[in-house]
Image (cartoon, grey):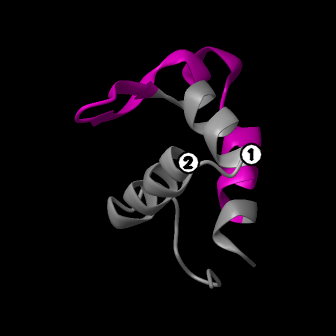
Amino acid sequence: MERKDLFFQTYANLPINARKEIVLNLDPHGPITWEVAYREIKADTDLGKIILQKLFDLKFIKTEDAK
């Protein structure tokens, strides 16, 4: 399964209220919520790629089966 798919699966399983919580603080962009991460990753932006990498680096998303 690709990393984006694993992110979307994780996001879908989050409680609605948790999606508004800050998951990363990226300089110089500032705080990133799960909702912002979703939009950036879905749009395949450069910021989305950075967010996705950081979420895997921090093991917020399990990496088994990730490509």
Q: Is residue 63 above or below residue 13?
A: below
Q: Is residue 1 left or right of residue 18?
A: right
**Can you identify the residue that label 1 sits on?**
42
Q: Amino acid at mark 1?
A: Lys
Q: Is residue 20 left or right of residue 41?
A: left
**Can you identify the residue that label 2 sits on?**
48
Work out which quarter of the rendered image holds the N terminus and state it.
Answer: bottom right
Q: Amino acid at mark 2?
A: Gly
Work out which quarter of the rendered image holds the C terminus and state it.
Answer: bottom right
Give x and y (percent) for residue 20. 55, 16
Mark nearer the N terminus (2 vs 1): 1
Give x and y (percent) for residue 10. 66, 50
Disc 1, SS: helix
Give x and y (percent) for residue 51. 46, 49
Disc 2, SS: helix
Query: Looking at this view, is 46 or 66 the one in front?
Result: 46
Q: Residue at x 35, y 65 (%)?
A: 57
Q: Residue at x 52, y 67 (%)?
A: 62
Q: Is residue 51 magenta?
A: no
Other-residue count near label 1 (Cα within 10 Å), few / some / many at <14 / 14–19 / ≥20: some
Q: Quadrant of residue 34?
A: top right
Other-residue count near label 2 (Cα within 10 Å), few / some / many at <14 / 14–19 / ≥20: some
**Residues drawn in magenta:** 6-32
Q: Residue at x 73, y 44 (%)?
A: 43
Q: Is residue 19 magenta?
A: yes
Query: Looking at this view, is 33 or 14 the one in front?
Result: 33
CA separation in Å, label 2 and label 1: 8 Å
Q: Residue at x 33, y 29 (%)?
A: 29
